[in-house]
Every structure is written in C-alpha cells, then in structure tokens.
Amino acid sequence: MNRLFGKIFGGIGVAAFAGSLFMVGDIPQMDGMTRTGEWLLHQSGVAYHDGQGGAGVLAEVLGGQLYFHDEGRQNNEQKLVLAENNGQFDTDSAGDRQADIEDRVIGDVYNQKTVEALGQSGASGIRKNNVYVDKLRNSLDVEYLWKKFYIIDSTTSVTKGIFDVKKLLGEDMRLPKKKGKKQILIYHTHGGSEAFSDSRSGKIEDSVVGVGTELTKELEKRGYGVYHDKHRYDLINGRLERSVAYNKALDGIQAVRSANRDIEVIIDLHRDSVGKGKHTYTMINGKRTAIVMFFNGMSRTRSGKIAYLYNPNLQGNLAFSLQMKCKAMEYYDGFTKPIYLKGYRYNLHLKKRSLLIELGNENNTVEEAKNAAAPLADVLDKVLSGRG
C-alpha cells in the first residue's frame, strides 16, 4: 500500500513539475523547458497526446484552470500587457529576428540586387499589377500567403483557420470621413528611444515622433482628422524605461479615445532596428525613401493562444495590414517588407483598424524617414476610401 501511495504522489509530483515547465513556454526564452515539460507530461500519464490537452487535465488535478491562467488578469490591463513590456520581446529587437531572412528580405519579396534596381528606377504611386498580389488574389492559397507576405517569428504560430485569405482580402476597411472629427490616432510607444542616423540629440522633430508629425500632415491633406499623440511613452521622469512603455501607452491612448469617440484607426509608429551596415531604402518620386514594415501581434505562442492577452480584433488587424501591404506593392513597389508576425498583442486589440508600423531603421536619415510619410498616407487613404 505504501508503495502504491508512493507511486501516486510521485506521479502527481512529476506532473506538477512538468506542468510548470510546460506553462513557462508562454515565455519565449523558456521554449526549451516547454519541450521538457511536454515530455514529462506524457511520461506522467496525466496528459493527452498533444501535451496542451494534458495541461488542462493536470490543472483539474491540481485544482482547476486558475492554477495556470488567472482569469482575473483579464480585467487588469497592467498585468495583461506585462509580458509585452519585457525588453527581450521588443518589437524592434534586431537580435530576435531570423538573421538569414532579414539578410535576404529587404523590400517586399525581393533580394538586395532587385531592390537596387528598383531604387534606380523608382516608384511613382501609379498602380501596376503586381505578380505576387495577383497570384494571391487568384489562388487564395494560404501557404503562398505565408511564404510571400509574412515573416513568422519563432515566438508565435499560425493556423489555416486564422488566415482565411478570401476573408482577409475582402474585409471592408472603408472609413467615411467625418468633417471636424478626429478619426485617426497616431502615437509612439517608443518615441523617446527611436531616432535616425543623423538625428540631432534632443530634437524631437528628428525622432520617430517627427515622422509622425509628417504622416499627420499628409493624412490631413487627404481630408482626415488626425490626433497625433506626441507623448514618448518610454520616457519616465526623463529616463528611458522601455520595460513599461506598452503599459503607459495603453493608458495614454485609452484617455485619447475617451475624449475622441470617433477614432477608428490607431497607428503605433515605430522605427525598426536592423544592426550596422544595412542602409536600406527605395526611390519614390525621385526621393530616397525609407522602407516600412507592417507588424501584427498574434496573441499566441508556438503552443497556441495566450488566453490572458485576448485580442477580439485579431482578424481585423490581420486584414488591415494585409490590405495595406497589397496596396503598397501595387502602387509603391519595393516600399514594404513582408508583414512581421510575433507572439504578443502590442495594444493592437482596441480597434480592428489597429496597426503597428516599423518605418525605416537606425541607418536611415531623417529625410529618408520623413519621405516615407507621403506614400504611407497614400496607401492608407486607398484602403480607407476603398478606391484604387
């Protein structure tokens, strides 16, 4: 009998330890421990065949799902975005990228030689059929979509159920203009730490915030009411604190939305980081122009959904960025990189037309970055108006 109880309690102990390892897989740097946890769950006999199901069974043994997922966190946004604020999972961290892909992909789906040719010829903003966009629209092939239009970060995962190509391309993103109303919000989670190669120290107009000002002007020229939030959310009492930037930004943009009920488009404008020696740009209307990258937070790890980072607008977010990407490829060939997909949420859950944009990188000049404002505004206008 003692031996029997020893086996039972020993099994529960192994399962508990395995479960703890399994669940830290929601933290990307613990991915190796996740695999260990999955194996131990199987060996413990308290798991389903896929490991993830085993977590649910184990949770019940140990007192229910709250052992793993604190449902109360869903009502506390400070905790909901805690993982997003970890600097190691930053949206623009060069070290976390797939280096071989980053070296190969410069603009759209082209290599460096092709981009140089595009740079010499330039883009003018006149619509041209794009072979990649045309094939996607004709085939509606999700595998082709993933291969040609996205970079999928190792922190996340994709399923065909999430990427219904027909629905993503067909989602109605039109936004009728309301005179005298602010309908677009531009803000900067990392406004205090993102500048360019020739930015003057301490000059906000030379940072990504200054690029936001240019984008605001270009959108206003096209008849949109824009609220440009110039607050630098990574600056706390004059010091850089990127670890809490997403928390602060969420509070800030919620306050802006409360005072401007007509806001339907929310843009978090960033500057990318790619490392030394990667000065990339394209030519648009005869001007050297920084390249942009649209970014989606998937709210899912490699194992599945992150329940406490629920995004009710994920499908809208994915449709918005994909439609922006396709328009850019048709009108400004070479202007965009593939869309980047990463594991967390990045405050994109507030509206379906929420978008995180990486515009240029640390090797671009201020002028190159600001030159991107006009084509970016034009692409956004084409998607919101439904024309072009």
Image (spheres, rainbow, N blue to C red):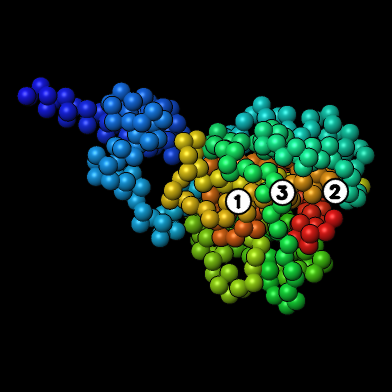
Q: Is residue 52 left or right of residue 328?
A: left
Near-viewer residue (242 or 147): 147
Task: Look at label 2 and name its amino acid.
Answer: Tyr
Q: Residue at 64% of width from left, 68% of height from top? A: 263
Near-viewer residue (315 or 114): 315
| Circle 3 residue | 169
Depth-wise, is mark 2 or mark 1 nearer the camera?
Answer: 1
Question: Going from the N terminus, do you reach mark 2 or mark 1 first?
Answer: 1
Helix, strand or loop at disc 2?
Answer: helix
Is 53 placed above or below 203 here? above
Is 263 placed above or below 68 here? below
Question: Going from the N terminus, do you reach mark 2 or mark 3 first?
Answer: 3
**Residue 114, image quadrant:** top right
Marks 2 and 3 close (CB-CB < 8 Å):
no
On the question of residue 269 being in view, the answer is no
Q: Is residue 106 left or right of residue 191?
A: right
Q: Residue at 65% of width from left, 58% of height from top? A: 353
Question: Going from the N terminus, do you reach mark 3 or mark 1 first?
Answer: 3
On the question of residue 39 being in view, the answer is yes
| Circle 2 residue | 331
Near-viewer residue (347 or 8): 8
Q: CA distance from mark 3 to mark 1?
A: 11 Å
Helix, strand or loop at disc 3?
Answer: helix
Q: Residue at 93% of width from left, 39% of height from top? A: 121
Q: Residue at 50% of width from left, 35% of height from top? A: 302
Helix, strand or loop at disc 1?
Answer: helix
Q: Tell me the tag on residue 315.
A: 1
Mark 2, other Cα within 10 Å: few <14 / some 14–19 / many ≥20: many
